[in-house]
Image (cartoon, rainbow, N blue to C red):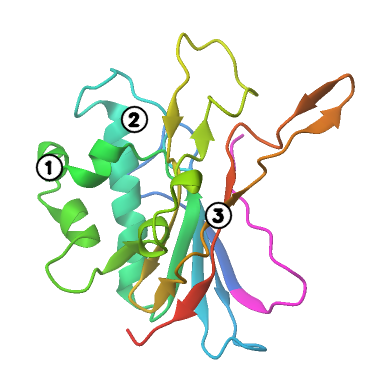
Amino acid sequence: SYFTGALVSNVLKTRMASRRDFACGSRMGRDLVSFELLPSGPLADSVQIFTSHLESCTDKQGTVGDRSQDLRVKQFLEVAGEMLSSHEHAVFAGDTNLRMEEVAAPKLSKALGLGHAFEACLRPKSRPAISDAFETSGQPAESKFTWDCELNDNLGGFDFKPRARYDRCFTNRGLKAVSGSFHLIGTSKFPVGEVSLFPSDHFGIVCDLDLQQP
């Protein structure tokens, strides 16, 4: 069976860890994990942490409204709703599988019967309700692609070398990515028997966050 997990340093204090299925469903066993990071050390306020692996792939390449794309967008809207519901400081980080057109095009939300909720959530006229840490930290070009088959050859079988920014970190108004802090990890190979491999076919993301007044 499929599952999502989160690893937390032993020096941090947490509570209210939970795992729940998406209300919109999943054909791939995807769920949402969350927990509260309690104030300790330099952390003055609690922070709600969310992670998931949203629905993968597309059933019909480039077709708006296919089932995987439909579920992926609706799953993220559920995440966004949780982040904006009752948490002053909330962050989501994980493999979203979101395509650029899914984030940028309001017509996709409309086609899925979601109105303009997805677009408005990310880019309202005022201060963004939810921000993409890659964008707010300065959009470093060298860290743009987290699934980069030009650099990462763990997966083969492609006629071309796809590159995408599937792995993302989103914050609500209570947190902001520190400028220049966003970078990738897992970009070096290590020996596995007689071959060398990257830790994953995806690169990991790291960024520093500052507490803000919501």
Work out whether mark 2 precedes mark 1 in sequence or the reverse, and give the earlier one.
2
Mark 3 sits on what residue? 183
Q: In this image, 200 relative to 34: left or right?
A: right
Residue on which disc 1 sits: 113
Q: Quadrant of the C terminus?
A: bottom left
C-alpha gap between disc 3 and disc 1: 35 Å
Relative image position of residue 159 (x, y in whole percent): 46, 8
Question: Which residue position is annotated with label 2?
Answer: 68
Query: x, y percentage for residue 110?
Result: 10, 42
**Residue 43 image position (x, y, % from top left):** 58, 86
Q: Quadrant of residue 2?
A: top right
Left or right: residue 81 compared with residue 88: left
The CA distance from mark 2 to mark 3 is 29 Å
Q: Is residue 5 magenta?
A: yes
- Amino acid carrying mark 1 in the image: Gly
Q: What is the three-letter code of the residue carrying label 2?
A: Ser
The part of the image, by quadrant, that contains residue 137 is bottom left
The residues tagged by marks 2 and 1 sit, at their Cα atoms, a distance apart of 15 Å
Sequence-wise first label, 3 or 1: 1
The magenta stretch is 1-15
Q: Image height check: is 11 above or below 21? A: below
Query: Which residue shows up at 85% across the image and 27% down it?
Result: 192
Mark toward the viewer: 3 or 1: 3
**Is residue 185 rendered magenta in the image?**
no
Front in this rendered view, residue 100 or 57 = 100
